[in-house]
Image (cartoon, rainbow, N blue to C red):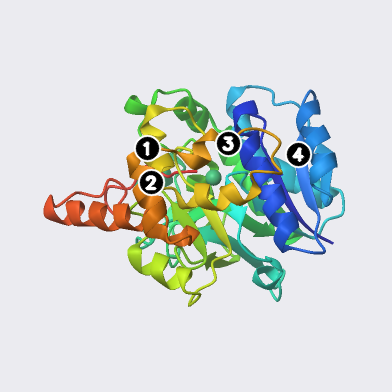
Amino acid sequence: MKCFCTFENRRESWIGLKLLALSLEKHSRDFTLCVGMLEGQDEMAEWLRRRALHAVLVPVPAFQDAWSIWSVKPRLMLQLFAQGYTDVTWLDADLIVLRDLAPLLAGLDDDTVLMARELDYPFEFNRPVMEAYAMEPRRELAGGVNTCVMRMTPRHEPLLRKLMECMAAPFFRDQTGTPGERRMIKWHYDQTIMEMLLTCGDATWTPTATVELIPAGSGVIQELGVTRYSVKDRLRNGVGLNLPWLVHALGLKPWDSNPRTRSVRAASVFSAFAEKYRDEVDEPMPWANASGLSSRIARMLSLGQPHWMGIGHCALGRLRQIVTRHRDPIAPGLRNASLS
Ligand SMILES: [Mn+2]
């Protein structure tokens, strides 16, 4: 029995969950979307019952303390295995589905973990995390993992339990309580630990699961600012040479009211796809039609193709990075900040 699952408890981010649910409804036929619900999310539950016909509301126990929210993914997936699901795919509530996901998941054997590739940098062991857990490198992957997509079967229950165990360790709690600028590694996200468990081991843990990564750019669009989704991928996707499955709002979300998101809002591919659901989300989406000059130019240059939204900004941004010899803050060697 297969299902997708997701969770979002922050009121201001329900819009992301709505876009995920609506885009699944649009592109997929036979599927179940299990949505973990805390007590008191009545408004969201009511919306899902009305708009998302394939959604199944799954009550989840309240989180005991602030840090434990970070373990919602393994928690919910284990709960679904216990309820009889045998093939569970977590989807972040900041994803929009671009086509039917059935072919992506078809033919995966029970041993295979399918995840998104984070960005296009080469794989690199995260030494500080490994040292904190006294683990040793065992194997490399094709690239860094992003847990925005996470397909597993009951065979991976030990992996999910190990993930929760690592996230319950005092070191992880300490890190989540440390302000960003003083945090040793920005790893209060599950994916840094998950990546370690898929590649490292110790006396009691051996990474055994087969790992498949959905390529970044051509399979899952990891939108982070305007330059991460490359001009090349935009062009190829826009003319149909590649058919990406998903677009992921990485880092700051376009709906955040943070002023730093202004440039993201102006030329966001995620927003361009989100706009298609304007009439179904039942709330205003002012962020999806930014009206400044920059946005108007982005819109004009896109020729109505969402993949090309911001393509001029992207090209200029890349040029600026080359000219100023910009040092990529999340390039290999400098990458300690994983982004959810
Ligand atoms: Mn995410």
Image quadrant in which you'd find residue 228: bottom left
Image quadrant in which you'd find residue 43: top right
Residue type beneath disc 3? Met
Query: From mark 1 to mark 4, how far is it between C-alphas?
Result: 37 Å
Relative side of 323 to 210, left or right: left
Q: Dot 2 surroundings within 10 Å: few (below 14), some, or many (20 or more)?
A: some
Relative side of 12 to 220, left or right: right
- Residue under label 3, please give it: 285
Q: Nearer the viewer, residue 26 or 64?
A: 26
Q: Dot 4 surroundings within 10 Å: few (below 14), some, or many (20 or more)?
A: many
Please name the residue shown 70% across and 26% down the image.
63
Of mark 1 and mark 4, the one earlier in the sequence is 4
User: Above or below — where is 316 with respect to 61?
Assistant: below
Of mark 3 and mark 2, the one earlier in the sequence is 3
Residue type beneath disc 1? Gly
Rendering coords of residue 304 (x, y %) = 48, 60
Instruction: Identify the mark at residue 296; answer none if there is no mark.
Output: 2
Residue type beneath disc 4? Gly
Query: From mark 2 to mark 4, how far is it between C-alphas?
Result: 38 Å
- Residue under label 4, please give it: 36
Q: Is mark 1 within 8 Å of ligand 1?
A: no
Kindly check if marks 2 and 1 are in contact, taking CB atoms under 8 A apart as contact. yes
Secondary element under disc 1, as helix, strand or loop, is: loop
Q: Nearer the viewer, residue 82 or 232?
A: 232
- Residue under label 1, please give it: 292
Rendering coords of residue 18 (x, y %) = 68, 42
Q: Is residue 169 visible?
A: yes
